[in-house]
Image (cartoon, rainbow, N blue to C red):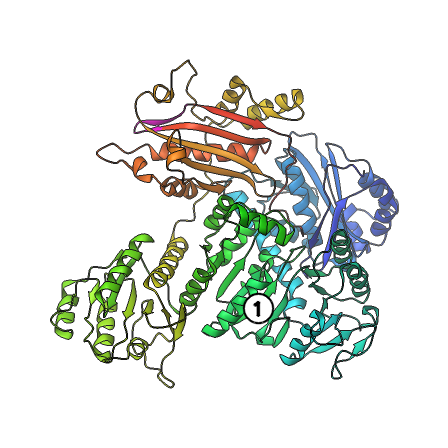
Amino acid sequence: MNDSSVPSAYALLADGSTVHIRPARPEDASAVKQMHANLSPSNAYFRFFNLSPLAPEREARRVTRPEDADHVALLALLAGQLVGVATYEATGKPGRAEIAFAVSDDMHGRGVATLLLEHLVSVARQRGLTAFEAETLPDNYAMQRVFAAAGLPVHRKFGDGIVELTFPLPDAEGEELDSYLDAIAERASRAEVASLRHLFQPSSIAVIGAGRQRGSVGREILNNIVAGGFAGSVYAVNPHGQARPDVPCLRSAADLPEDVDVAVIALPPAQVPDAAEQCGRRGVHGLVVVTAGMGPGGRQLMEICRRYGMRLVGPNCFGIAVPSARLNATFAATQPEPGAAGLVMQSGGIGIALLEHFGRLGVGVSSFASVGDKYDVSSNDLLTWWDQDGQTRLAVLYVESFGNPRAFARTARRVGLRIPVLTVIGGRSAAGQRAAASHTAGAATPLLTQEAVFGQAGIIATHSLGELVETAALLSCQPLPRGRRVAIVSNAGGVGVLAADACADVGLSVAVLGEGTQRLLADLLPAAAAVSGPVDTTAGVGAAAFSACLEQVAADESVDALVAVGVPTALADLRTAITSVRVSKPMAAVLLDQPDSVRMLWPQPGDTAPGRLGAVPAYAYPESAVRAIGHAADYQAWRVGQRGRVPELEGTDPVGARSVVSDFLAANPGGGWLAEDECARLLSAYRIPLVASRVVTGTDEAAQGGGVETLIGVVQEPVFGALIVFGLGGMATDVLGGNVARLSPLTDTDAEEMIRGVRAGLLLAGHGGSRPADAAGLADVLLRVSRLADDLPEVAELDLNPVVARPDGVQVVAARARLAPATPRDPFLRRLR
């Protein structure tokens, strides 16, 4: 059954060990028989409802017969040994199959059956099954717990000493699917954390390729580990002799003691696979491969890691660091400072720069991973780790490519509800795309797609490294603003004007203070001061008055955040004035005389008065401070905003749509563009309103004299899946541009945000006395297009342009669709890269 349509995969068990899930083959019969024969009498009885000695052989024949539409059998292998079997067999009832499991006695409680069930569900859903059935004995509590915890609804029926279970499989949308995916994500999170403990809480580490001379990568990593004060066991591997007199040195990785937690490999590419193989045989739990240019050896390295269950950071990376554990397994020039920010970087250079910046600012780092070519450990894993480590309060990513973007988005969304997740978007230009692809040996992700992923996940996306550092500085020490109203207090009116302009640029409003606050400020400040907002204290104000002014402004109910702008004068030390303020709202300072783009202002030693914020970020320019507050306000709005749901859509006919696709691809195996009538039938199956075609003389006549022309499109990307694009259509496409995109499936909130997010949203909202377009109708079309794209991955491109939105409805004027063969891939199935 080597040509099975069911893919094989490696995945993590509950304890973090790696198991291989693959289809059963005829040659597996002996192993399947032996595993069942080795079951304890009680487990054998639970499985077969009898203790017949013939049962193992009969089961082996059933499991290993060739796969067909009615029969799927999956095996779980740990270190090459069979530890679990799962099957489904058609029951004869439409859309239903009966499932059965067996797990080796010594593997109970490690999640083998649950993982096999998830893979069976994935296969069954792709094949159109609607429900699983199972029979179990009433006292088989272990299997009943597996079913109950799977996240699927369970219907029980008791009769003749048997418990009959029915599990409806989740549809492509709806609350049942969300519940099931949440259950999978929770299990995946626990397994990932367990698998990462050896990397980020190690008690022993080895450096393979630790040179005897200073200046080599391996030697500098070893020096940093020792200099950092790592308390665990440290080993050097060098066939030519001792690297350091204070570190035990071995001639090869084969000489390592058993169960070393982490091995850092810094060898020429050709030597890496052999070293990894030796590490696997010695029971090393995780590898960090800094070597670049692996070429064909990369596949071999990955196969070795999977075979021995070793998690892999890299290759082509800078190393890992956990400052709180005094672990610095990088070749950075300085030791990283412990703190609150978790960093995962595809670029080691950017990572090292951020380690320096965060150390200088006092933000510090909880853990750092330079993942390089990202063969295995990725940003998904680190986000999951930070979500539970008890140290990380800020997650910072630099990602140039994605392995499983939908899983990434779901993980980032979950983590982002607890801590801010920041990134800098790389590869925004054509040249940047080429450089990113070359740099990470993988396809760089287009800008529109990156923005879609980050937007849906609530990730704070910045457009420069400086902007990232400036935003992280604010989020690391200030509370989040409740809204978007910013009070500006300055001792120089001109700088206050610039700050006000910057607020408008990022969608913030300048707070207008209440009359009571204005009266208090008028009594406090010189007569020439402006007190309504922005507040201009004048340059003649003293430090105490400036500080009191900030406190009064912060107390105003119309204020959500403050920007304190200080121009140095001989009359006042505004740094002290700002750090002595007692306020509970977020505040950023602007000090025009400081050389750094951002630095922290700290209270005087011993100053712990109630209400004191602690550190205050100070920026060299008002635009930087306002931009950071804007990001914080956007993040808070996302956190408290409506999460949205994938709604049920009336009148869809996915079976009819599938027949259009199947008939076309049967006649055109290589794919191609649908004819006009075929495209109309496809859209009709999802009740997408396409106007009847007739000969017209131009777009104006097609629009029938009114409405806003928009476009809605679908692009099926090989990694990301369906990307839904929305923007202005017709001539406005070229003139205004500004398309927005989201990954399918869209929620109702996604659709609404896409409509509000286009650059010319005023046209849709009604402008110059015109009535607003039917936004609800547009959202409905977007949701139906999303469902179509999700149901039919063979729709490689869909272009609806123009889609005319009028006050009384929405109609698609022109449509075209390109089909291509596609292999469905479950983005939420638990499996390693």
User: The N terminus is located in which quarter?
Assistant: top right
Q: Nearer the viewer, residue 731 or 402?
A: 731
Crowd tier of the residue under label 1, counting other residues whose Cα lies within 10 Å: few below 14, some 14–19, many 20 or above: many
Where 813 sits versus 395, above or below? above
Which contiguous range is marked in magenta? 805-813
Quarter of the image for residue 633 reads: bottom left
Question: So how many labels did they put on this image?
Answer: 1
> What is the magenta segment's predominant secondary structure?
strand
Q: Is residue 222 left or right of residue 602?
A: right
State the image coordinates of residue 589 (x, y, percent, origin top left).
33, 69
Q: Nearer the viewer, residue 532 or 121?
A: 532
**Res 201 visible:** yes
Quarter of the image for residue 572 reads: bottom left
Q: Residue visible at 19% across and 70% down?
A: 537
Q: Is residue 758 left or right of residue 429?
A: left
Judging by the rendered image, the residue that carries numbered circle 1 is 367
Q: Residue furthest bottom?
A: 606
Amino acid found under the numbered disc labelled 1: Ser
**Res 402 visible:** no
State yes or no: residue 80 in magenta. Answer: no
State the image coordinates of residue 379 (x, y, percent, origin top left).
58, 57
State the image coordinates of residue 514 (x, y, percent, origin top left).
17, 62
Q: Residue visible at 71% across and 56% down?
A: 293
State the image coordinates of residue 156 (x, y, percent, origin top left).
61, 43
